[in-house]
Amino acid sequence: MSALAALDGMDRLTSGEVLVAQNVAFAVMAITMVVAALRMVTTRNVVHAALYLVIVLAGVAGQFLLLGAEFVGVTQVMVYIGAIVVLFLFGIMLTKGSFGEDDGVSSEKRLLASLVGLLVFGVMAAALVDSFEDAEVARAAPSTTAEVSDSIFSTYIVPFEAVSVLLLAALIGAIVVARKD
Amino acid sequence: MLLNQFLLLSAVLFSIGVYGVLARRNGVLVLMSIELILNAVNINLVAFGAFRATVDGEVFALFVIAVAAAEVGVGLAMVLLMYRNRRSIDLTAIDQLRG
């Protein structure tokens, strides 16, 4: 009986109603992310921009979970929302002269920048729609942390060590640059 | 789920990040827009990894997250140095090298 129930559960995973739920979750998160990103680059208050960035980053973590990448999703929450946003808030607080100062952008510059942004999006969207018309992301099961770590510590061990050295260099570099002497 | 829905979302976020880098003058906000661009790239990597049913995309996304953390550290240190020297983080004011 329990085996039958498990089989029923497996069947439901690929059935229509789960797909609908996934698509609804995607749409809600995508709209929230795009609105928050637009508010982030247009708001005058820098602290508000940092908080809008949190919404976008949380949405990206949700998309990772939707794609079955659990470990990357959790890392996104810990590293980005936990560490990088706090670093940004510290940067804003330590440069307090910059609060609400960022309103002198000429409308011509803004127009040119939005033109460039729209052009970039147009070219990319045309290329993507042309290349991957209706390819499906159909993953049988979410990838496990064990698979990810196996890949990092076998195939990608040299890039992993390089990233370690890069982080050390960035740490020392940040201290040297920001030090008062 | 279609692959294209993730790729198009990533393209939208990337374009918004490009707009932020080009239009804003505040140094911290430009760094935040760069984070937006890097996150768009991460969505692409993970989506392609799921599309091809490998974990390689996720591994590369983790590398990008590590590089982004390093970049934010150095970038904010530079913004702080700029604020200490000039009492302002307006990027358009840094034009000493203009001929």
Image (tube, rainbow, N blue to C red):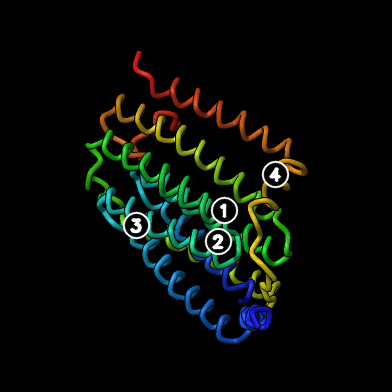
Rounded to the nearest angstrom, the CA distance separating label 2 from label 1 is 7 Å
Disc 1 target residue: A72
Disc 3 target residue: A52
Q: Is residue B29 visible?
A: yes
Q: Position of residue A74 (x, y in %)?
A: 51, 53
Q: Position of residue B16 (x, y in %)?
A: 45, 60
What is the chain identity of the residue bearing mark 2? Answer: A
Between B10 and A10, the residue placed more toward the observer is: A10
Circle count = 4
Pointers 2 and 1 in contact (CB under 8 A)? yes
* Secondary structure at numbered mark 4: helix
Residue at figure coordinates x 36%, y 47% from the top left? B29
> Which circle marks residue A152 in the picture?
4
Residue at figure coordinates x 53%, y 76% from the top left? A22
Residue A133 falls in image quadrant: bottom right
Mark found first going from the N terminus, 1 or 3: 3
Q: Position of residue A76 (x, y in %)?
A: 50, 51
Mark found first going from the N terminus, 4 or 2: 2
Disc 2 target residue: A64
Residue at figure coordinates x 56%, y 31% from the top left? A167
Pointers 2 and 3 in contact (CB under 8 A)? no
* Looking at the image, residue A79 lies above or below residue A12: above
Mark found first going from the N terminus, 1 or 4: 1
